Amino acid sequence: MPSCYEHSAQSPRPLSVLAEYFPKGYSVFYKANTETCPEANQYSKALVDFYTQELNQAEDTNLTLGQMGLGDGVSLLLLWQSLLQCRKNNPELSRLKVHLLIFEPHAISALELKQLWQALGLFDANSPVAPQAEQFIAGKMAQINGAQRFILEQGQLRIDVHFGDLHSNLTELMTPEHRVTHWHCLPHIAHTQTEFAETQASQLQFNQVQSNANQLNQAILWQMGRLSQDNASLYLDGENFKPSASDNNALTDCTLIKMATQAGFSRYSPNLFQASSDSCNAIPLGERRALRQQQENRQAHCPVPNSLGERRQAVNNSDSIAIIGGGIAGACLALSLAERGKAVTLYCKDDKLGDGATGNRQGAIYPLLTPENSHLSQFFQQAFLFSRRRLLALLHEVYPIGHQLCGVLQTGFDERSEARLEKIIQGQHWPEEIAYAVSPEQASALAGVSIDKPGFYYPNGGWICPFEFARACLEKAKSLANVEVKLNSTISCIKPLAANVDSKDASGCTSQASGTLWGLYHQGEIVGSHQQVVLASGASITAFEQTQALQMSGFRGQVSHVPSKGELAKLNTVICANGYLTPAFNSTHCVGASYVKDPEHLDFCSDEQAENGQKMQQSFPNLEWPQDIDVSDRNARVGVRMVTRDHFPMMGCAPDIEEIISRYQTLNASPQASQNNYAKQCQQYWQQTPAPVHHNLFVLGGLGSRGLSSAPLAAECLAAQLCGEIAPISATTLALLNPNRMWMRKLLKGKALC
């Protein structure tokens, strides 16, 4: 038995090590006896006062704050508490939405953060932040690179925790319309390389990071400036940034002020949180604009709503955004938009929500991993964790959603799949909160039935009832904003309407918005018009003229419903091998699914039913419990899932494929096409020229078999883009999600489209 499959529960890192990585910043504020460290108490109170001032003086309904370093995590609890107190004291702040960006080079898990907070007494009965601390820990923050989004307080507080290299994470964020108004720098982010090297030796086994990954330097400050408003300020912790003549290695307050000023931030004196009145000069602001334009040029092939290069067009919250599709994608998007106060009209062709591929009784939720931990793998880890948080938030409000977070056990079922799984297991040091290898004995104990081979266990995975999840998202959205659902509303065609033509919106009111409206038609009759339209219609997403060329294919999937009996009834985790099998829900298991490309019909298929009945027997031929899977009653459900070749969903602006091809043909027909360097010129053209799109038309689809894991985050990112916010994924990942990616990949490499 390979030792890599023998799992023993990993303990969190020792508290002494965690304390060095994530030093105390403000936690003493919550200690019963603060006399032991009055300075920490002073700085904690000052931070609360600062947050209170920022919240009360917010000039917009959106306030974006940045924080360099997570530290002991207490600062985010201070902000959370300040927001609650301000809303209590000032009802006008009920519309204020706060977005906190945290950048921390050293990843920490929820289990380790809980250990820190327990030592600080934050979960004690007399702790004023105990409810918030418990809620944040329940979000299962994981030791993974990239952003992890937490949506709290009915969407009024969004926290993005970015783990990994500071400069890379900052550089990879697209410049938003709503930019950062204030940055707060925690002490450990300003260590010099020498200081870090001294403390790194004993900790290297836990985190492999570059020696300058946690240093606040000029390059990092410039990227912070790119994401900031012109008058953005930078606050430094007075206790930890006082100039010290005796400490030659310390990065002094004066040095930080100089670098911050060069990057265009407001200057601050060494005194605690006291800002000078110096205004930013034109030179650093010009540099910031240049950095924004450079990024815009680099990402021109990946158009983003509300980007610098895209035509801006204000959309009021009262102007309804149309969503075509009543499945998991449309429902999640409606919720994300409603949390931002946006009005939504959702058109569903069926007489009830979630009647397409979302209509299955049980769907597995777990991340898609690759041996090299590719961008695809990283996206699905982020998405899986976010989807889980969405579920728990809805359950907390007692929305009825069938589910069981019972874990997912993945095993091989033949030599090829077993080799592939072993390659994934060996490829990375996966965080235990994502997945870990188990022996056959451990797998059997987890599954409740006998398993005779090793596997990979996803402890935070499980199954969810997709249509109940979608309906809960819509009900929650209705409670937050003006969200209307129109059932039995088939949209067969969408066309742009002239700007000067009065047209009725979904509510029957004449739209006054400037610019082109999209008309929604059924059998030649207009049924609504909207300034912005999102196509999230699952299997019919390519039925429109504007999207028919999108490179995704429909695959039929028949899921069999089998009665719970015998040894099968003991199953208590999802099994993924040759197909998947769920624990019982209402005395029935789901097993499947078939996978038939471009199906001719969606009728029940006896052959596929029989194949489903054999999947677990083929996976575990030497075991008896798979014999209890009985598909003879012909109980099944058929749906179509749209699949892309690269397994990424499609999310973003609808590409104008006709215009892309037209430009490609025009360039190839030019007299310069025969020149030796012409291919390079074409590459530069497509790299720096904004890719053609259908303005204010967007796509959310291609979710494949993992819509439960990917739809909530993809929808959240699209909603953030539509509202001019920072999305919780990198620019590289946005390009991989972009619906135009199949064409752009070829054009950026100078390859032919045909």
Image: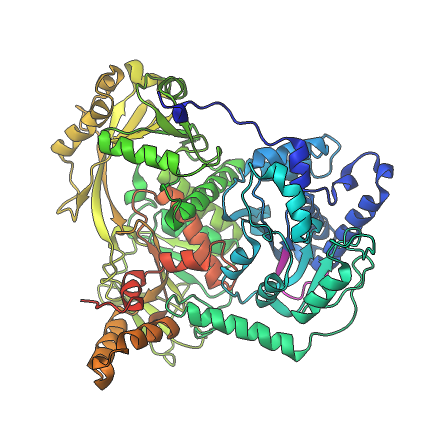
Residue 668 visible (yes or no): yes
> Does 522 sit left or right of 383 as displayed?
left
Find residue 105 and report its horizontal and vertical position in percent: 58, 48
Find residue 569 and report its horizontal and vertical position in percent: 33, 18
- Look at the image and say whether residue 333 sits in the magenta stretch: no
Identity of the residue drawn at 28% across and 49% down? 350
Q: Height in image: 35 above or below 304?
A: above
Residue 365 visible (yes or no): no
Find residue 294 and report its horizontal and vertical position in percent: 48, 72
Residue extending furthest toward the bottom: 671
Identity of the residue drawn at 65% across and 47% down? 196
Residue extending furthest toward the right: 35
Looking at the figure, which quarter contains the C terminus? bottom left
Q: Height in image: 202 above or below 562?
A: below
Q: Height in image: 189 above or below 269?
A: above
Identity of the residue drawn at 73% across and 65% down? 257
> Does 289 sit left or right of 715 as displayed?
right
For the residue pair 83 and 511, the one nearer the viewer reads as: 83
Q: Height in image: 670 above or below 7?
A: below
For the residue pair 514 and 387, the one nearer the viewer reads as: 387
Q: Residue 372, located in which quarter of the rendered image?
A: top left
> Does 234 sit left or right of 495 as displayed?
right
> Does 8 sit left or right of 55 as displayed?
left
Identity of the residue drawn at 48% across and 36% down? 431
Find residue 83 and report its horizontal and vertical position in percent: 68, 51
For the residue pair 677 and 421, the one nearer the viewer reads as: 677
Count how many numbered circles sit on residues in the image.
0
Q: How is the image coloured?
A: rainbow
Looking at the figure, which quarter contains the N terminus? top left
Q: Which residues are magenta?
A: 56-66
